[in-house]
Amino acid sequence: MLETEQMTATPAYPQILSESQIRVTPAAGAKFRELLSEAGEPNLAIRVFVSGGGCGGMTYGMTFTSEEHTRHDSVVHGEGYEIRVDAVTLNYLKGSEIDFRANGAQSSFVFNNVFQSVGGSGTCGACGASGGGCH
């Protein structure tokens, strides 16, 4: 392979994620549908991201997005919702489960089986650092 070909070659990312790659519980799916319905915008999706720092190590967050997914995104299609995950985040979320837990006024999305070796807390928005629609 020529040097220029190596520099421009793009690794293949899975475009559609299976349940074995990222599982969404029925409670989380219902909350995603509710949030998207309340937002009232057509073609709206949920972007999941990971960022460093915070009180529990890696922080997992979510935000709404109306932008088209990129060639580096993978997508989880659910009934009434779509989740987009970039390639870096996917490395931290492979094999994980996204759940939603409501406990009175304390409700949040929870990421189970996350990449714990890098200090992932497995919660979204627990300390308010992640922002972006996790509650």
Image: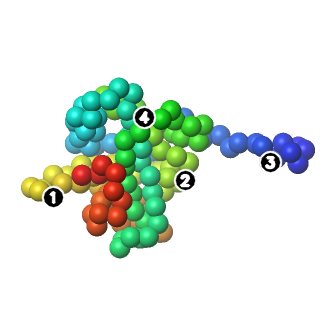
Q: Which residue is mark 2?
A: 88
Look at 34% across and 64% down and name the residue there.
129
Residue at the spot 47% in from the left edge and 44% down from the top edge: 85
Q: CA distance from mark 1 to mark 4?
A: 28 Å
Amino acid beneath label 2: Val
- Position of 94 with respect to 36 (left or right) is right
Q: Which residue is mark 3?
A: 7
Q: CA distance from mark 1 to mark 3?
A: 47 Å
Question: With 101 as the anchor, is 16 left or right in this view?
Answer: right
Name the spot of residue 24 as percent of width and height, x first: 33, 42
Q: Marks 4 and 3, Cα distance to the nearest angstrom?
A: 30 Å
Residue at image point 76% right, 42% down: 9
The earlier-in-sequence mark between 2 and 3 is: 3
| Vertical order, 54 against 61 (above or below) | below
Which of the two discs, 4 and 3, labels the residue nearer the N terminus? 3
- Left or right of 15? Residue 7 is right
For the residues marked 1 and 2, what is the alpha-carbon distance in whole angstroms? 29 Å
For label 2, count other residues whose C-alpha is less than 10 Å away and answer few (under 14), some (14-19) or many (20+): few
Rendered residue at 54%/40% (across/down): 73
User: Regarding mark 3 in the picture, which secondary structure is present there?
Assistant: helix
Q: Nearer the viewer, mark 1 or mark 4?
A: 4
Of the two numbered discs 2 and 4 in the rendering, the one whose residue sits closer to the viewer? 4
At numbered mark 2, what does the secondary structure look like: helix, strand or loop? Answer: helix
Q: Amino acid at mark 1?
A: Gln
Q: Which residue is mark 1?
A: 106
Tell me the residue that label 4 is attached to: 66
- Seen in the picture, residue 41 relative to 133 is either above or below; the reply is above
Residue type, label 3: Met
Query: Decide: marks 1, 4 in contact (CB < 8 A)?
Result: no
N-terminal of the pair, mark 1 or mark 3, is 3
105 vs 87, nearest the viewer: 105
